[in-house]
Amino acid sequence: MKHLLKLLDLSTEEIVDILNLADQLKYEQKHGISHQHLKGMTLGMIFQKASTRTRVSFETGMYQLGGHALFLSSKELQIGRGEPAQDTARVLSRYLNGIMIRTFEQSEVEDLAEYGSIPIINGLTDFCHPCQVLADLQTIREYKNKLDGLKFCYIGDGNNMANSLTVGCLKVGMSVSLACPDGYHPDPQVLEFAKAYKNFKLVADPKEAAADADVLYTDVWASMGQEGEAEKRKIAFKGYQINDDVMSVAKSDAMVLHCLPAHREEEITAKVFEQHAADIFDEAENRLHAQKAVMVRLMAPGK
Ligand code: CP
Ligand code: NVA
């Protein structure tokens, strides 16, 4: 594995290897065992969109691994004034040991990887959010002690989260049911990938998708960059909510996850959110551990 651009690029073995290392690093951190695998290294973090979890977990993770992280707002970089990603990649490759980028176009992340000579990590694009899903899988495995054979249900927008969750969950042997309204289905590339899996289903009815689910997941109705569509989307997504009615058809011990930030009473009720706050904030914590594993595998492959 040279980069983390999207989960479609990873084998099941690579995903499981990252989850295993993430568990080990989490254990070490909780027990005060130092793991300075990236001593003396620097990660550049380019942000074209807002972030709380991604920024803080990468920066803290890099520090815990003995390295250093640089926050690079695209507004203050020449890339924000039109310097091509190809040139930015070649320049930053001379200074840094890795780049994490959060941006709009997936092609920008792929360009950095093509032209740079250091590992590139996708910290969210309009197409996908692989770091989040690695943390999600780590959390599901912690709670359920397995992944293979579990039923995963996603309700809401067929967005970057739905794309990465579909690929990640199918690759580790889970069955995946998505409930998305017409016009808001996942990316065609993801649907093409999922077609080969008998245990994949895309339906319109949230309760049909949630039936017997072990894990339920949702995300905001309007993602970053779609603020102008918020009102239209409130109408399109009415009913695409994790609430008591949906929970009543899932397994009685089902967990509920949300990548955050959450909009209470839109995609999830405040009641269900608070009932599952432990799952959701363990999930947020695991961003730190999963991303540390990704950085070690990419930036210090021998460790
Ligand atoms: N879930 C997630 O990526 O959060 P941030 O947008 O705060 O980074
Ligand atoms: N779909 C959301 C995810 C945020 C982590 C967005 O792109 O804004």
Image (tube, rainbow, N blue to C red):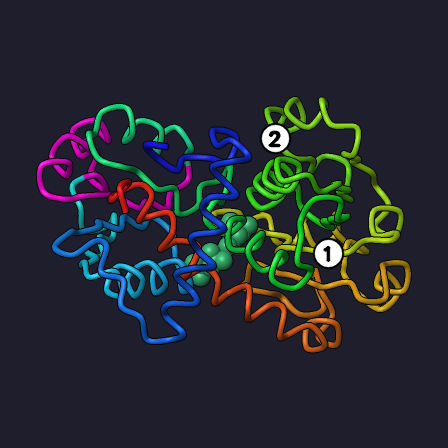
Q: Residue at x 51, y 49 (%)?
A: 134
Residue 99 as seen in the image, left or right of residue 12: left
Q: Which residue is drawn at 65% across and 61% down?
A: 257
SS type, badge 2 = loop
Q: Above or below — where is 131 with respect to 107?
A: below
Q: Above or below — where is 196 with respect to 16?
A: above
Q: Is residue 237 visible?
A: yes
Q: In which quarter of the image is residue 2?
A: top left
What amino acid type is highlighted by mark number 2?
A: Asp
SS type, badge 1 = strand
Q: Do the residues labelled 2 and 1 touch (CB within 8 Å)?
A: no
Q: In which quarter of the image is the N terminus?
A: top left
Residue 86 point in image, percent of width and height: 21, 26
Q: Which residue is drawn at 33% across and 43% down?
A: 297
Mark 2 or 1: in front is: 1
Crowding at mark 1 (Cα within 10 Å: few <14, some 14-19, many 20+) = many
Q: In this picture, which residue range is highlighted in magenta? A: 79-104
Whether the magenta-drawn stretch holds residue 5 is answered as no
Mark linked to residue 215: 1
Crowding at mark 2 (Cα within 10 Å: few <14, some 14-19, many 20+) = some
Q: Nearer the viewer, residue 168 or 232?
A: 168
What amino acid type is highlighted by mark number 1?
A: Val
Residue 255 point in image, percent of width and height: 72, 64
Residue 251 as seen in the image, left or right of residue 265: right
Residue at image mark 2: 187
Q: Above or below — where is 117 with respect to 281?
A: above
Residue 225 as seen in the image, left or right of residue 269: left
